[in-house]
Image (tube, rainbow, N blue to C red):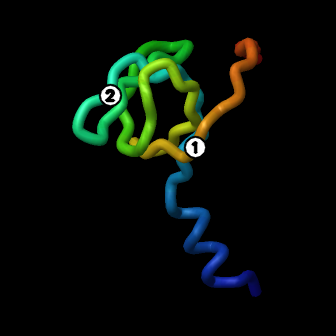
Amino acid sequence: MSNLFSRFQKLIPTYPLRVGEVIAYADGVATIQEQGGMATARGEATVGDRVFFRNGAIEGPAPDLTIEIIEV
């Protein structure tokens, strides 16, 4: 018999970790330019920072590396 909690966790959607550059910041909300468009996220950042964000929240700074998109 499988663990009931692990079965429950599989029902909850997971959000991908995304990366982008902050292009505007006001009142705790950052506008982020990413490869596929723009998004907004809550958190601390300054204009020009590269950040990791997930589900509308900034998780931390991202390194300034080139982004490579690979489609399968």
Residue 8 in picture, x, y percent from top left = 56, 73
Looking at the image, which is closer to me, 12 or 56? 56
Q: CA distance from mark 1 to mark 2?
A: 15 Å
Left or right: residue 21 versus residue 10 is left
Quarter of image, res 51: top right
Q: Position of residue 27 (x, y in %)?
A: 23, 38
Q: Quadrant of the N terminus?
A: bottom right
Q: Amino acid at mark 2?
A: Tyr
Residue reaching furthest bottom? 1
Location of mark 2 (residue) = 25
Residue 7, percent from left and from top:
63, 73
Mark 2 element type: strand
Label 1 neighbourhood size at 10 Å, few (<14), some (14-19), many (20+)?
Answer: some
**Residue beneath the point at 56% across and 13% down:** 35
- The residue labelled by disc 1 is 60
Q: Nearer the viewer, residue 56 or 11?
A: 56
Where is residue 41? Give x, y as percent. Answer: 38, 37
14 and 23: which is toward the camera:
23
